[in-house]
Image: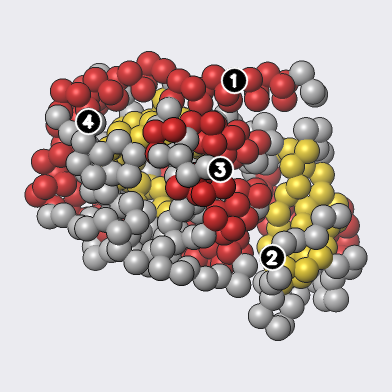
Amino acid sequence: MTASNDPKLAYEAALKLPPFCQPTWLRPIITSRGDYRIAGGVASFTQLDVVMADGNGGYCASRMSSDQLLADADDRNLASAALDRITAARPQYAGLDMGRAHLMGVLNVTPDSFSDGGTNLLPAKAIAAGKAMAAAGASIIDIGGESTRPGAAPISRNQELARILPPITGLSREAILTSVDTRHAVVMTRAVSAGAAIINDVESLQGEGALEAAAKSGAPVAMMHMKGTPETMQQDPYYDFAPVEIYEFLRARVEAAIAAGIPAASIAIDPGFGFGKTVAHNLALVNWLSLFHGLGVVVLFGASRKSSIAKISAGEPADARLAGSLALAAAAWRQGAQIIRVHDVGETAQALAVEAALRATDN
């Protein structure tokens, strides 16, 4: 078994306490011929990393089979329910079959987004770009009118609406599924009225009135983890163990959304690669992405063109990070992410088609 590079996580041959006698997290170990399928999709597993707090501010883990987990668990009902959340097929989300992965094409209608700011600011160009991404294989076009890059300054709601409503309306008239990338309740309401099918919120519906507006709209939601705000999120972010702490944040947000009247089938979560995380945190999230299927909802992942790629590599600008973006998209696909948010739709679709063919011939 490979030891973790995170000093807050230690692997043990056997846990000192039985699983589920206290908070316990399960990370499926992905294999091509596993006994169980994650969320009814293509990713499979036989063993899991069973993680518990060690009482000293850290975490310990032991690798075991599902049968061993059930045999050792302090509460077998909790253990069985946790396994069921991982393996149960997800219902349709926004009318899409969650038994396979879908690409969400990024359409920024902003002058200052980190990658393509200004490129699609004019409505006609934005609509044409959205149609091109849909033709290249995107199931969803994610339209954002406010940059959330590190250090981005907020804009007025009227500015945001003026940018997003024309492409949402235009693409919806073409029967293209759109999501609105916004943090603001009034924008959510207006965007859904204009045809947006999904609300995608980097603040996880924590803004004033956002949760209520999303629930009232009846639209499916995607809720992301972000530590801090776009202005502050990269100012020395710290976690004891990022995957578990981000999981717990998202678990609370899923519970809040359900309590507000949003069905679990209409919820997706996003661990927020690049939002209030160092390179090490981001890599840990990718390696532990299968953990998040334990929330029992759709998993969305977006790392396209993020700065961590350049930091790992040779400092490339955003438009020269395709290779790294493809590697991260493939890693997310292998761990069962149902929605992968990307800038380069055609190239990602091709890469994942090859991944799928390799998986199909290895079974």
Disc 3 designates what residue?
313
At horizontal 56% and vertical 47% (from top left) the residue drawn is: 312
**Viewer-nearest of discs 3 and 1:** 3
Residue 106, compared with residue 83, is above or below; it is above
Q: Give amino acid for label 3.
A: Ser
What residue is disc 4 on? 120
Q: Looking at the image, can residue 333 be seen?
A: no
Q: Which mark is residue 104?
A: none
Label 3: which secondary element: loop
Dot 1 or dot 4: first in sequence order is 4
Comes first in the chain, label 1 or label 2: 2
The image quadrant that residue 74 belongs to is bottom right
Q: Position of residue 31 (x, y in %)?
A: 78, 38
Left or right of 57, for residue 264 = left
Identify which residue, 192 or 81, lies in the foreground: 192
Q: Which one is in front, 50 or 12?
A: 12
Residue type at numbered disc 4: Asn
Name the residue located 82 percent from the left edge and 55 percent from the top edge. Answer: 2
Among all residues in the image, which is located at the extreme bottom? 56
Q: What is the crowding at mark 3: few (fewer than 14 residues within 10 Å), some, or many (at least 20)? A: few
Residues packed near mark 1 inside 10 Å, few (<14), some (14 to 19) or many (20 plus): few
Give the structural element (helix, strand or loop) at label 2: loop
Where does label 2 land, which residue?
6
Residue placed under numbered mark 1 in the picture? 353
As measured in the structure, the alpha-carbon distance from the residue carrying label 3 to the one carrying label 2 is 21 Å
* Disc 1 from disc 2: Cα separation: 33 Å
Determine contact: label 3, label 1, CB under 8 Å: no
Q: Is residue 5 visible?
A: yes
Front residue of this view, candidates 27 and 209: 27
